[in-house]
Image (cartoon, rainbow, N blue to C red):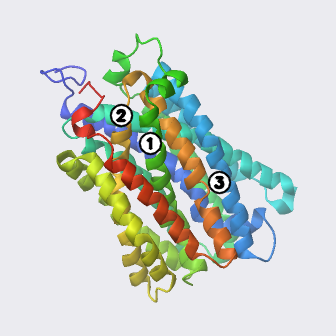
Amino acid sequence: MAGGVAAGGGMTPWARIKAILGGSAGNLVEWYDWFAYTSTSLYFAKHFFPGEDPVGQQLQTAAIFGAGFIARPLGAWLMGIYADRGGRRAALTLSVALMSLGSFAIAILPTYAQIGVWAQLGLLAARLVQGLSLGGEYGASATYMSEMAGHKRRGFWSSFQYTTLVGGQLTALLVLVILQNTLSHEALEAWGWRVPFAIGGLLAIVVFWIRSGLEETKSYLAAEGEKERGSTWALFRDHPRESAAILALTAAGSLAFYAYTTYMQKFLVNTAGFAKDTATGVMAAVLIIYMLVQPPIGWLSDHVGRKTTIAVGLGIGALVTYPVMSAIAVAQTPLMAFGLIMILVLCHSGYSAVNAAVKAELFPAHVRALGVALPYALANAIFGGTAEYAAGWLKKEGIESAFYVYVAIVMAVAAVVAFRLRNTNETSLILED
């Protein structure tokens, strides 16, 4: 064995694990930085959007959150092209550098009381930079980890892409829990909310160093001679059906994810009536289990088929979203809320554990990163990026339950699309093991 290659020509187990860990560590930090905004927005909203209406302040911070999604398709397009032409490793390194810049900017940003509307514009600019970063991160990391995973256990190994995505959100919440228990409420609202962003910026620097030493994938190296590497025209000309399928799947996956996780923390406070720290604790417990179930479901998909786990998860999710969210709205105890939310995220796990692998397996290597990233980012911006704002607006209009119906309908449509997919366990276009 040499250079991480086994005697039979495949990767050694250790080389594969090292590559997966290297890719997933950066993914965790990227998503930690992204979700630090949502986990702390209850505390910093008034510093950038003064007023007496907390729901209105959250709507404005949600609008900035959504604006970050506007940059994600552009980041996905540019970084997808770069990953297909310059390499997966190069794209992963650049994306984490951009995320570090955005996090440090928010950590030191003056408030509205200090510089007026420039504070709001600064917050918007920082989120746009983070959106560019994350738009590129998903496609590059999903492609890299799927190509490094190997045919036999691709569902299992690529599930760590979402494991670390949830891990990033969980880490952001845990940092907030620590701050809630070490700082006074006044200190947390005054300056403590900046700490998670400073931590994220520092972690991103560490990951930049780790990613610069990653091994390039065989799939990318094998496609170096292709003339249309990273071609947007070639992507939509040759793979319109696959691109449309990713749009539909991501629409449901991202909308449900933000409804069940990031918005859920605010839902527990503003609708169910739980205290902020209680809501944080409930969501931290949910995310721990949600994170841990990804690899087992990924392993299951290697045996029953990845399209099957997606279709079943989204289909059941479509059926239970309305009654479960209605029950959470009147939940009497944190334990009851926890159990109900777990029903939702377990359904979503059928999609989340295997979506990276399925999307990567639909495209040939020369347009794979772009094919995974661009349709994903477009759907994520339209559906995921507007989820919190749509939920908040419907609540303000007095028809909050319409949001549950909206989520259920989008999931039902995607479940039909998933059922019609080819079985990528048998037809994967990732040819190199």
Secondary structure under tag 1 reads: helix
Residue at the outermost left position: 7
Identified by mark 3, the residue type is: Gly
Marks 3 and 2, how far apart at CA: 28 Å
Identified by mark 2, the residue type is: Leu
Mark 2 touches mark 1? (CB < 8 Å): yes
Residue at the spot 39% in from the left edge and 48% down from the top edge = 417
Quarter that holds the N terminus = top left
Residue 39: x %, y % from top left: 57, 64
Marks 2 and 1, how far apart at CA: 9 Å
Q: Quadrant of residue 289?
A: bottom left
Q: Which residue is mark 1?
A: 246
Residue 203: x %, y % from top left: 51, 46
Marks 1 and 3, how far apart at CA: 20 Å
Quarter that holds the C terminus = top left
Query: Is the residue marked by circle 3 packed among few (<14), some (14-19), or many (20+) residues within 10 Å?
Result: many
Mark 3 touches mark 2? (CB < 8 Å): no
Residue 97: x %, y % from top left: 57, 36
Residue at the outermost bottom position: 332
Q: Which residue is mark 2?
A: 362
Mark 1 touches mark 3? (CB < 8 Å): no
Closer to viewer: mark 1 or mark 3: 1
Residue at the spot 44% in from the left edge and 59% down from the top edge = 411
Closer to viewer: mark 3 or mark 2: 2
Instruction: Report the side of 257 relative to 20 (left or right).
Output: right
Is residue 276 at all visible to an observer of this figure?
no
Instruction: Report the label total.
Output: 3
Instruction: Report the side of 295 relative to 108 (left or right).
Output: left
Q: Which residue is mark 3?
A: 66
